[in-house]
Amino acid sequence: MSHKGNWSWIDAELRRLGISRTKLAHLLGVSTPAVSKWIQGKQNPGFEHLAQLAALFTGGDLNRLYHRAGFNWSEALQHLDAQARGTGVPPPSDFGDPDTFITLRLPADALHARDASTTLLTEASVLASNALLKQANRFAEMREQATHLIARLNGSHSPLTAQMWYALADAEVMLGNYAQAVDAADMARRLARGPAGSTLVADAYVISAEAWRIMGNWAETRSHCNEARRLYLKAGLTHNEGQMWIDWNLGRTATSEGNYDEALEHFDRMISLVGQLGHASGAFMQRYGVAMLADLKGDLRGALQQYMPVQRDARRDGNAYWDAMAAWKIADVLRRQGEVARAASMAQQAMRTYESLDNEDLIASVTFTWGYCQIHLGRAEQARAQFARLARQLAHNIDQSTVRMARLGEGLALLARLAAQDAQDPQNFETLVPMIETDPPLCRLSLRFELLESLFTAEILRLNGRTAAAHDRYAAIARCAAKHDHQLEHAHALLGMAEAKRLLGQPDREMLYQALAIYDRIGAAWGQVHARIAQALIEPNAAAQQLQEAKRIAEASSFHADVALIERLRLSVPATTAHRLHALTFA
């Protein structure tokens, strides 16, 4: 930048956020005197710090940051592209547009320069620009820049080519293109050369481990993490960012497998790494992972207490990605607690962020939560249409986990719609089974999701009159959920078993009491409603009281479909048809 900017306003922002100059310096990896020089107008921040400053002070908006500092957009972008650093290439003429890509447009002669200093400066410019794009969550541009430069390098086996393949892999993961990420990471490993190349190889193993984990191949995830760890240790890099990502992926893999003690060990190990690295996103990851453990175990109140500070701090730091991740999970907890309208609003908020990141996988995931909210609100057809659209849209996606989630969501919505109909044909429920039984079997997801699929199938069996088979499946789910401390799914399975036993003429009040006790303990409103409905069906003398309490909770939670069901039961629906009306759905 050709003149000194006005950075004096940083002091007021630091006071507002409760952050000292020293803390800011630590976050940015600079000295406290350097921060003081910026504020005093003696020096500008380095361009590599601008995205972080924007994240802290302007909601990630680089344009607003430059305006506050007194720079025009054209000059700022010229600096960001760093093309003057050894290349002498003038910026494009359209830099006045705030939406212009900040992607480097270096010519081939700079990329293939024989002059050592030009080559070094060019590579530094490319890597700095790439880091800036990543910090600003501009992953589509990051992918475009990497693809553009790989093409301009024209098959070169230079270190920069390997770095661009790695950047491409990194971008593809963030965009939800996991198979492409694995391929790009593999290419980066093959092209890496020299001492620095061994670190890049390890980094590329970490990226592919992340992709394999999300695609449900946990054996590959562990294999790639172990190889990355071996290479880092060989290079003497015991406390680098890659090690943190290894523990993140191994912790998430263990979580998916239901090995929660192992998962907690990995997340605990992240704490020291995050502290030494001063890695803000790493801190969000670690706290999110621990909150997820509480969530999976059905500790809804505890999970909410841990997710909410993650969102608060991510919003304070302008980290849109982790803000959205926390919002999605908070929405899912609130939904299960009965705050459905609020949950739907938060899910839509997260969805907008994922749409801006162009990540179809995350869009599908949060749509799952949003669709469940619609089922609770009595809008099963609206939810079904959304899930069906997702399933069609993602049908040819290499990451079949999102397709699997959409298909299950569509099935649950159809089940809820069928259950709400006055005239029901049990055979209608049989048509739902193919929605989750595929050939060949799809990839593994988390244990919780697989329990949910099993509950869905058991429910179809029960509503189809295959009551004994449904009971056996519920019993297997209950054993698995209890073993892995999945309280919510354990309660669901107990409720399903109790319903099956009622239909078999073997009412089991104790089993219902156990289910209701879990629902009450963890604050799961949906379960509280349906356990009381089930009690009303087996305890005629207490039916009026149980249905009244169920209606109170359902109305407070805006469970419109359940309110309608309760009213029908209060009008003395014959016992022979009551079980058809009482479809659990387990949304």
Image (spheres, grey):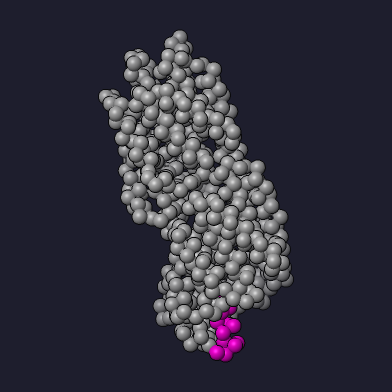
Residue 84 coordinates in the image, percent (x, y): 54, 84
Is 125 within the magenta?
A: yes
Residue 156 coordinates in the image, percent (x, y): 49, 80
Which residue shows up at 61% across the image and 73% down it?
A: 197
Provide the residue span drawn in magenta.
114-129
Whether residue 76 is visible here, answered yes or no, is no
Residue 518 vs 283, above or below: the answer is: above
Residue 332 coordinates in the image, percent (x, y): 49, 41
Of the pair 232 and 175, the residue shown nearer to us: 232
Q: Quadrant of residue 290?
A: top right
Q: Quadrant of residue 434?
A: top left
Whether residue 326 is visible here, answered yes or no, is yes
Please identify the quadrant where the N terminus is shown: bottom right
Secondary structure, magenta segment, majority class: helix
Please identify the quadrant where the C terminus is shown: top left
Residue 328 vs 12, above or below: the answer is: above
From this viewpoint, which residue is outermost toward the bottom?
115
Which residue shows up at 46% across the image and 55% down it?
A: 353
From this viewpoint, which residue is outermost toward the top?
541
Q: How many marks?
A: 0
Of the pair 468 and 253, the residue shown nearer to us: 468
Of the pair 447 and 67, the residue shown nearer to us: 447
Is 42 within the magenta?
A: no
Of the pair 364 and 305, the residue shown nearer to us: 364
Q: Is residue 512 left or right of residue 374?
A: right
Which residue shows up at 41% across the image and 51% down it?
A: 400
Which residue shows up at 49% across the image and 37% down it?
A: 451
Residue 217 coordinates in the image, percent (x, y): 51, 52
